[in-house]
Image: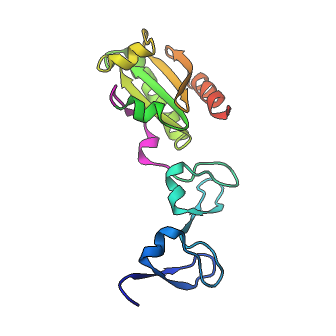
Amino acid sequence: MTYDEMIIRCLNCGTKNRIPKDRLHDRPTCGRCHAHLDDIIIRCLSCETKNRMPENRLNQRPLCGKCGVPLVIRGGDLHPFEITDETFFREVLSYSGSVLMDCFAPWCAPCRTLEPILEELASKYAGGVKFVKMNVDDNPLTASKYNTRNIPTMLLFKNGTLVNRLVGTLSKEEIERQLLAIVETN
């Protein structure tokens, strides 16, 4: 074996394949069973189904083929994370999927009451809905653009478009109902 070759074991049949490094980007196939060698297998944490997919699809939020649960959960998906006027476009408007943006202020008591509810929902819907929060005192441009006059206000986006606005302290069940309405619409 030379230094410009790699040995890759096929996940399908177990055959060791010698592949030139300059051909790795071409989606090489197994010489015996012709399965793609860049496929990986991810077991669903919900239904235990094995899902085979190309490695380059991991950043596209793949779902289980059987039950539809997200297969890859990024650390940032488990908790709402804070964004600013500068990061708003990248994190919300250019995101392909559903986003719940919590508009809050640190001095606001109802905002602090809502925080554990949003933490719980972010953990529950990790991978399916992105949860972000924005301090309206520090980020007046985005707050004024979306006419955020009362806090707490939750803005629900789908594929970069504002689709719903929830104002005030709402129950977990009501927020979840509004969230599911957005996630299920195409």
User: Which corner quadrant of the image does residue 159 belong to?
Assistant: top right
Counting from the top left corner in percent of width and height, residue 164 is at 57, 20
- Relative vertical location of residue 80 with respect to residue 66 in this rendering, above or below: above
Residue 20 against residue 167 in the figure, above or below: below
Q: Position of residue 23 (x, y in %)?
A: 47, 74
Magenta run includes residue 77: yes
The N terminus: image quadrant: bottom left
| Along the viewing direction, whichever of 167 and 113 lies nearer the viewer | 167
Q: Residue at x 54, y 17 (%)?
A: 166
Residue 182: where, in percent of width, then height?
Answer: 62, 29
> Is residue 136 at least partly visible in the picture?
no
Magenta segment:
73-86
Q: Name the residue rendered at 47%, 72% in the picture.
A: 24
Is 115 positioned to the left or the right of 121 in the image?
left
Q: Quadrant of residue 51?
A: bottom right
Residue 61 x, y percent position in the rendering? 54, 48
Residue ID at (43%, 26%): 115
In depth, the one of 48 and 38 nearer the eye is: 38
- Seen from the viewer's position, the closer of residues 13 and 47 is 13
Q: Is residue 141 left or right of residue 179?
A: left
Q: Residue at x 53, y 38 (%)?
A: 96
